[in-house]
Amino acid sequence: MFRFISSIVLLSTLLYLGNSRIGSLPPLFNFLDPVHGVWISSNIEERSSTTLKPIEGLSDKVQIVYDSRQVPHIYAQSTEDVLIGLGYAVARDRLFQLELQTRATAGTLTEILGERVLPLDQQARQLGLAWAAEKNHSALNPTSESFRYQLAYAQGVNAWIRGMTASELPLEYHLLGQKPMEWHPQYSAYLLKRMGWTLSMKNTERKKNLASGLVGKDAANALFPVNSWIQEPMQPNGHQEPRFDLNPLPEPTDPYDEPGNSPSHLSLFTLPEQLDQNNFLETTLGSNNWAISPGRSNNGNPILAGDPHLNLSLPSIWYEAHLHVAGELEVYGVTIPGSPAINIGFNRNVAWTFTNTGSDVMDFYREEVDNPQDPQAYLLDNQ
């Protein structure tokens, strides 16, 4: 009898543990379920061409053809339809990326990743990026292109989510014991806000204040001027000598030949190591791009090069695609998952790329509260 009761208790314990989450791990029985568990996750190296079935928002058929590099070529009869196809293709390849970056902006990572990421959610909510995105999206005219294109993209993402089979659920969802969330049109605005924050790396005021304590106010102003003497537009303004000389460059000289330029005399402006902890020394994102005119290329065609320097990520921030609407649109390039557009690319007439200016677009304010330990009120206009 004792052995029977022990077996029942053991079995009940195993059933309970097998159907419960342990820390961040998914329920073991669900994870190992031979029908719906991780075993059926497919690892398809080659995508097959797809003709989208009638789905919400689709006015005509959309065909997605994958080439040998697994780049989707999307053919449709309208811009909205081709963006539905783009959302569908991106969700097919990058569904977890779409959700994770959206939750990172909204401050809802803890819902799927647990308390360990609470500081990230707190920072996101303090920044208010999602709040700003929702506000911008709600102000859009429903008949505007921005609204219609974001809606079409969202319809494509949701069409993939609703139509995918159990074997097509990304591995990450199995590991977390989660299901994909519904994609809303305003999540495209979340992405733009997040990218704006990512590229707002300049912090001149704080750096100047820190430098002032080391080298004095006058030197700090010289190091971090509001208007730099070297700033000159590419198109000379006529008020001073143009800084850009297009004549052939002189032969390079050895800098050590100049008096005072020996290695022993060269030095860099360095700061105490502890300032690194105050974000004084930071990894700066930057980019560059350039163009060559037809007369300077071997084949007589212009060349445009864009080199956007963004942090390395896995998967990549870029997603390559080709969009085609007969007589209306044909564009090839890269998009960022979540964006209903080709961000860098070319069409039949023009190619484009972009970079970040590195401008100081961040401001810091000192906030005075009544009680730093338990603030209930803050000072505004001396009240």
Image (cartoon, rainbow, N blue to C red):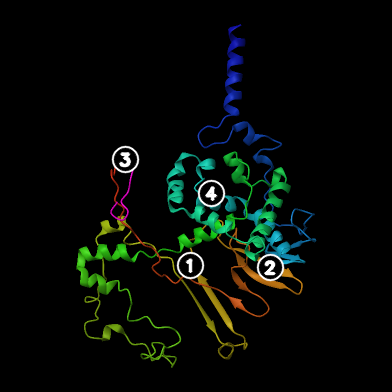
Residue 47 relative to residue 295: left or right: right
In this rendering, is residue 239 above or below 344?
below
What are the residue bounds of the magenta stretch? 374-383
Mark 3, mark 2: which one is toward the viewer?
A: 3
Spatial CA distance of label 1 from label 4 is: 24 Å
- Tell me, yes or no, whether the two marked residues, 3 and 1, touch with CB atoms within 8 Å: no
Residue 24, position as x, y percentages in the image: 52, 37
The N terminus - image quarter: top right
Residue, disc 3: 374
Q: Choose between 194 and 15: the one closer to the eye.
A: 194
Alpha-carbon span between mark 3 and mark 2: 55 Å
Q: Is residue 250 above or below residue 109?
A: below
Label 2 packing within 10 angstroms: few (<14), some (14-19), many (20+)? many
N-terminal label among 3 and 4 = 4
Give the distance between the C-alpha atoms of the residues marked 3 and 1, in whole angstroms. 42 Å
Residue placed under numbered mark 4 in the picture = 103
- Residue drawn 66% across the image and 58% down it: 153
Amino acid, disc 2: His
CA–CA distance in space, label 2 to label 1: 23 Å
Which residue does the numbered mark 1 point to in the structure image? Answer: 309
Q: Position of residue 174 (x, y in %)?
A: 61, 41
From the image, tell me which residue sits under label 2: 322
163 displayed left or right of 257: right
Q: For mark 3, does the 10 Å Cα neighbourhood hold few (<14), some (14 to 19), or many (20 or more) residues?
A: few
Question: How many other residues sit within 10 Å of disc 4, few (<14), some (14-19) or many (≥20)?
Answer: many
Q: CA distance from mark 3 to mark 4?
A: 29 Å
